[in-house]
């Protein structure tokens, strides 16, 4: 059985590879295979999988990509992820991707969907709209029709029908994957010293590029290995990190927070991996099942409307309680409208529930970690020194 | 600039702007709405707050609600140079410096007692009608306001035209929300029963005004253009984009405006500016993006001083794309409202927006495209550099880029804007000289940035 170091090394290799060699190899292994790229925060990956295609998470270029062309398409006041994504496209790092999906997260990603149509006319580009009305007969009906349209597009792409049976099988595969993802998160919350967040991050990032079955095996192996290993327990402060659901923080930032004395016990880095909170029904009309899961059994985040004022931001308080966190770190990319507009509302909710927090901004290519380490360290120390507990 | 500047006729000081009768009427209409807002409580009237794109004014009127538009308050505060301090107040209270300044101007106004641009208090809304059309920030904006007002909030989710068309699924979804969520909520808040015939009547009135608005906007195809379709256009869209669409007042305003523009055509006049008539048109421009409001007249002056007329703009389509043929239709009231919301400019995908601009450059025989990129508004701004390249490639006309903000005075740098505009106009001159000396045929686009 591989140890955590071996598993994490493989994940790191996948993470660092901006040419997506593993996805290219998957595609090349059988003629006719298709790859469907998607951006944060959510797409119905089950449909892509059921169509026989590989869902590929495209989360920008991180701090390892020199952005030259991408900057020529964006003003200085726009976040980094569209620039580096354009850079990946222009430099042909995504030339094996047959279809790109742009979810409804913000105006920048929304407009990027149209840019992609113009810049890469050979790629099928599609905007994925999701309902902000949560009634089955209104938002549910709308979303079911949108899913059916996507299903048709995927069938056209792959040249074969996407059957109900295939979608149900894919739902089952993703249910299994989400169960394992939840298990990793629960394990980290219970014994964070055994599951460093930098490792969890890499493990989850692997899920962006690997076939779901392979990722599930990797998760299971990691869980077994991590449980078997002993690691030193530190007197760190338990924190929930929020606001990083689209443009990703540099890995060094996550490591810096850990080094500064924080155990991250929950985060929103890759919501797509655990968007549905519990199992999606895998034996009925799969389009209805996916729509119902989106409406009634999915995570909360800024891009999703909260109709009930009393519930606004409570997901964060509940995460703090469930994961026994001692504070929250708001970590938003610069110029990220969803995260930065949401932040004051969430902070008000935390104030009402006496949860301490700090906030800072980053960019995917941030290089200077010292100020963040100092801020996170001071926050962690202040909680240890001054909290009522 | 090396080229001579055509003097404008009449030259009052900048402070005494020339106003045509339609402008005076509009000013009275706006003042009237602020008066209705300020006195709503004493008159027992309920107040709805909503947004300009996807605004359902005809529906709001069916419930006798007074319509408050926070974007318009921010603009009015910008024009009166009050928005800067309001934005800083909101930032002091935790809003990020990175986000939309409309939102911050509104939250700052609320924090400082909700005194409206006319100096009178704006009452707390009884309902926030969150028409989520063409801009993600709208949703957050009204969530932030809901937190303060704790009033009923109704979401109308308008899907984005990602594939460049309105599908039956999108329309049915919006209609279902109108029927099942929006109308019952407005009935509940107002205590007024919905009457679809009343709605039809308002929509009939809207369509009349829309015909006249389109006639006015399209008058800019003439040479010289009798209107400025951006700076002047901001006035022309005022009634139809806000609390007046569907009212006889709006119909009368557009009839009056059309008569005035016809008069200008008959007399061979160019647009009216704050300093009087612009006597000679030297440059015909299409502009993409909203204007800056904190230095609106200075900004406009930079153009008319150079003889530059804006013959078409995308900003004047943000509250409805009537020039593409849409009309509110009393025969299909709810479907028509849905299609209106779906078709607003920023709800169209980027290829569709580029097609519109290309059409404007061609049909209005413009010399080129100028993009005013707004720091606050990602809905407009994200992708504009590609818009610029595409328009240059497709039309062979030069395009250029300036950067300002809607209502944040910190992001309006007059020297930079003027410098860029002058360089751009020089480029047009150069292009013309090149075309005059070159054999017939399409010329190569020149990058302007």
Image (tube, rainbow, N blue to C red):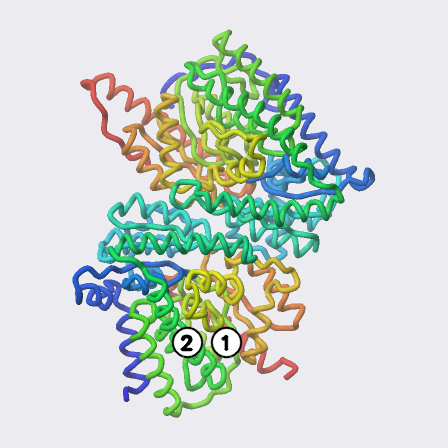
**What chain letter is assigned to the residue under label 1?**
A
Give residue B369's mark: none
- Can residue A335 be seen here? The reply is no
Q: Judge left or right: residue B157 versus residue B110.
A: left
Count of labels in the image: 2
The crowding category of the residue bearing disc 2, from other C-alpha atoms within 10 Å (few below 14, some 14 to 19, many at least 20), is: many
Q: Position of residue B172 (x, y in %)?
A: 51, 45
Q: Is residue B134 left or right of residue B448?
A: right
Q: Is residue B421 visible?
A: yes
Coordinates of residue A254 in the picture (x, y in percent): 42, 72
User: Are the residues flagged by discs 2 and 1 from a single subunit?
Assistant: yes
Residue in front for this viewpoint, B441 or A56: A56
- In the displayed structure, B382 sits above or below B10; it is below
Q: Which residue is mark 1?
A: A377
Q: Could you tell me which quadrant the C terminus of chain B lies in?
A: top left
Q: Which residue is mark 2?
A: A181
Residue drawn at x 52%, y 11% as measured from the top left: B264
The percent coordinates of residue A171 (x first, y second) are 39, 69
Q: Are marks 2 and 1 in contact (CB under 8 Å)?
A: no
Question: Which badge, 2 or 1, comes first in the chain's sequence?
Answer: 2
Foreground of the two, A176 or A111 = A176
Chain label for disc 2: A
* Coordinates of residue A250 in the picture (x, y in percent): 38, 67
At mark 2, the secondary structure is: helix
Outermost residue toward the top?
A: B267
Q: Nearer the viewer, mark 2 or mark 1?
A: 2
Q: Secondary structure at mark 1?
A: helix
């Amino acid at each position: 059985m591989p140890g955590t170091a071996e598993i994490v090394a493989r994940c790191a290799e996948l993470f660092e590879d901006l040419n997506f060699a593993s996805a290219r190899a998957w595609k090349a292994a059988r003629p006719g295979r298709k790859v469907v790229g998607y951006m944060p925060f959510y797409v119905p990956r089950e449909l892509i999988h059921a169509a026989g295609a590989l869902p590929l998470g495209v989360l920008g270029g991180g701090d390892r990509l020199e952005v030259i062309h991408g900057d020529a398409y964006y003003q200085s006041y726009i976040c980094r992820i569209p620039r580096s994504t354009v850079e990946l496209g222009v430099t042909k790092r995504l030339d094996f991707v047959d279809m790109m999906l742009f979810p409804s997260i913000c105006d920048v990603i929304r407009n990027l969907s149209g840019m992609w149509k113009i810049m890469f006319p050979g790629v099928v580009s599609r905007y994925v709209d999701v309902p902000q009305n949560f009634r089955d007969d209104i938002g549910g009906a709308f979303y079911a029709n949108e899913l059916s349209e996507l299903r048709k597009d995927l069938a056209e792409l792959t040249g074969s029908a996407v059957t109900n049976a295939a979608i149900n099988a894919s739902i089952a595969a993703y249910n299994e994957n989400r169960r394992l993802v939840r298990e990793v998160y629960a394990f980290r919350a219970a014994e964070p010293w055994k599951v460093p967040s930098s490792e969890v991050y890499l493990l989850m990032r692997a899920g962006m590029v690997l076939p779901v079955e392979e990722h599930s095996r990797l998760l299971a192996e990691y869980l077994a290995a991590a449980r078997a290993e002993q690691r030193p327990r530190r007197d760190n402060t338990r924190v929930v990190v929020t606001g990083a659901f689209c443009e990703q923080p540099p890995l060094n930032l996550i490591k810096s927070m850990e080094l500064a004395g924080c155990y991250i016990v929950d985060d929103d880095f890759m919501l797509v991996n655990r968007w549905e909170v519990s199992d999606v029904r895998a034996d009925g009309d799969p389009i209805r099942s996916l729509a119902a899961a989106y409406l009634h059994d999915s995570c909360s985040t800024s891009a999703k409307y909260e109709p009930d004022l009393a519930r606004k931001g409570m997901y964060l308080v509940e995460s703090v309680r469930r994961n026994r966190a001692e504070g929250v770190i708001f970590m938003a990319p610069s110029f990220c409208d969803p995260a930065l507009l949401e932040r004051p509302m969430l902070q008000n909710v935390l104030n009402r529930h006496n949860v301490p927090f700090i906030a800072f901004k980053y960019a995917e290519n941030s290089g200077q970690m010292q100020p963040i380490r100092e801020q996170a360290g001071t926050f962690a120390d202040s909680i240890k020194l001054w909290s009522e507990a | 600039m090396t080229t001579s500047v055509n003097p404008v006729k009449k030259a009052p000081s900048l402070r005494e702007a020339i106003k045509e009768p339609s402008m005076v009427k509009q000013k009275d209409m706006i003042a009237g709405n602020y008066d209705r807002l300020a006195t709503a409580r004493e008159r027992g009237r309920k107040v709805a707050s909503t947004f300009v794109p996807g605004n359902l004014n005809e529906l709001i009127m069916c419930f006798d609600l007074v319509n408050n538009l926070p974007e318009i308050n921010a603009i009015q505060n910008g024009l009166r140079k009050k928005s800067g301090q309001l934005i800083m107040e909101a930032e002091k209270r935790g809003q990020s410096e990175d986000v939309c300044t409309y939102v911050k101007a509104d939250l700052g106004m609320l924090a400082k007692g909700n005194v409206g641009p006319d100096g009178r208090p704006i009452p707390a809304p009884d309902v926030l009608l969150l028409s989520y059309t063409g801009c993600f920030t709208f949703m957050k904006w009204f969530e932030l306001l809901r937190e303060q007002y704790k009033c009923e909030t109704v979401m109308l989710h308008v899907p984005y035209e990602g594939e460049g068309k309105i599908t039956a699924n999108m329309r049915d979804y919006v209609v279902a929300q109108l029927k099942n969520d929006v109308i019952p909520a407005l009935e509940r808040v107002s205590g007024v029963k919905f009457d679809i015939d009343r709605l039809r009547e308002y929509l009939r009135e809207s369509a009349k005004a829309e015909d006249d608005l389109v006639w006015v906007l399209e008058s800019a195809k003439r040479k010289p253009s009798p209107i400025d379709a951006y700076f002047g256009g901001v006035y022309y869209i005022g009634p139809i984009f806000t609390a007046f669409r569907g009212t006889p007042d709006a119909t009368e305003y557009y009839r009056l405006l059309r008569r005035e523009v016809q008069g200008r055509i008959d007399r061979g006049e160019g647009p009216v500016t704050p300093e009087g008539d612009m006597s000679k048109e030297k440059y015909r421009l299409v502009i993409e993006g909203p204007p800056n409001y904190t230095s609106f007249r200075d900004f406009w002056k930079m153009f008319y001083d150079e003889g530059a007329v804006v013959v078409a703009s995308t900003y004047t389509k943000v509250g409805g794309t009537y020039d593409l043929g849409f009309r509110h239709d009393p025969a299909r009231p709810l479907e028509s409202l849905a299609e209106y919301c779906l078709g607003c400019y920023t709800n169209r995908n980027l290829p569709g927006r580029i097609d519109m601009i290309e059409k404007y450059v061609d049909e209005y025989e413009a010399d080129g495209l100028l993009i005013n990129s707004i720091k606050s508004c990602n809905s407009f701004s994200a992708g504009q550099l590609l818009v610029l390249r595409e328009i240059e490639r497709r039309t062979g006309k030069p395009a250029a880029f300036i950067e300002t903000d809607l209502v944040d005075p910190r992001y309006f740098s007059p020297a930079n804007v003027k410098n860029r505009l002058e360089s751009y106009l020089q480029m047009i001159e150069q292009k013309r000289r090149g075309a005059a000396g070159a054999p017939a045929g399409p010329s190569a686009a020149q990058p302007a940035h």
